[in-house]
Amino acid sequence: MRGWPLYPIGHVENAVTKRMDPDRFIGVQSKIVVDEAYVKGLEGLEAGMELLVLFAFHLSAGAPLMVHPRGDVNREKRGVFATCSPNRPNGIGTGHCKLLGRDGNILVVEDLEAMNGSPVIDIKPLDCVRPLREGTSEARTSSRSA
């Protein structure tokens, strides 16, 4: 498989314009501005929900397969897939955040580890992911029913 196209559904707006330690995103509010073509897909999202957001690391370049975790050269190098490095073969980031509110095509979220301008690829409620970890067939059935 040689690849497939990904089309952003929107973008992130916040005050983060340069790379920073992931811990510094705690408490940062962002807006996810969803393109008008996808607004109907936001129906059912409610304040208080936890979201999983897929976005592009649009300012990252290169993808070394071995990296020092968090760029700390005092730490032993690890494979990129064993780290949270933004420099990845496909440049896809994931963020776990809390939905604070929605106004039309704009989602206001907190704790999203994405920089201003990051293209958003997809949004899922976190409960689509977590029940699978619990291992019950009931959890799997309810999370996959939609």
Image (tube, helix red, strand yellow):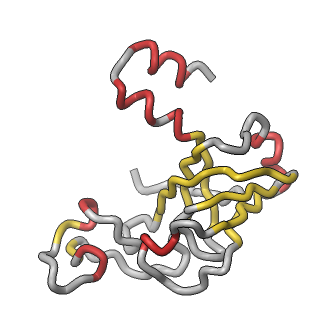
Is residue 61 placed above or below 126 in the rendered structure?
Answer: below
Left/right of residue 101 with respect to residue 135 in the rendered view: right
**Going by the image, does 98 lie left or right of 76?**
right
Q: Nearer the viewer, residue 16 or 100?
A: 100
| Residue in the picture at 48% in, 75% down | 24
Quadrant in which the C terminus is drawn: top right
Q: Residue at x 60, y 51 (%)?
A: 98
What residue sits 59% from the left and 40% below the top?
A: 125
Q: Is residue 43 above or below residue 3?
A: above
Residue found 37% across the figure and 80% down from its top: 62
**x and y percentages locating residue 134 in the rendered image:** 36, 26
Residue 83 percent location from the top left of the image: 28, 65
63, 112: nearer the viewer: 112
Number of numbered discs overlaid on the protein picture: 0
* Nearer to me, 29 or 92: 29
Please tell me which residue lies in front, 10 or 43: 43
55 vs 38: above or below: below
73 to the left or right of 136: left
From the top left corner, tell me how far across and down residue 66 is, in percent.
Answer: 20, 73
Q: Position of residue 119 (x, y in %)?
A: 63, 66
Residue 107's image quarter?
A: bottom right
Furthest-left residue in this view: 76
Q: Residue furthest front?
A: 27
The residue positioned farthest toward the top in the image shown: 138
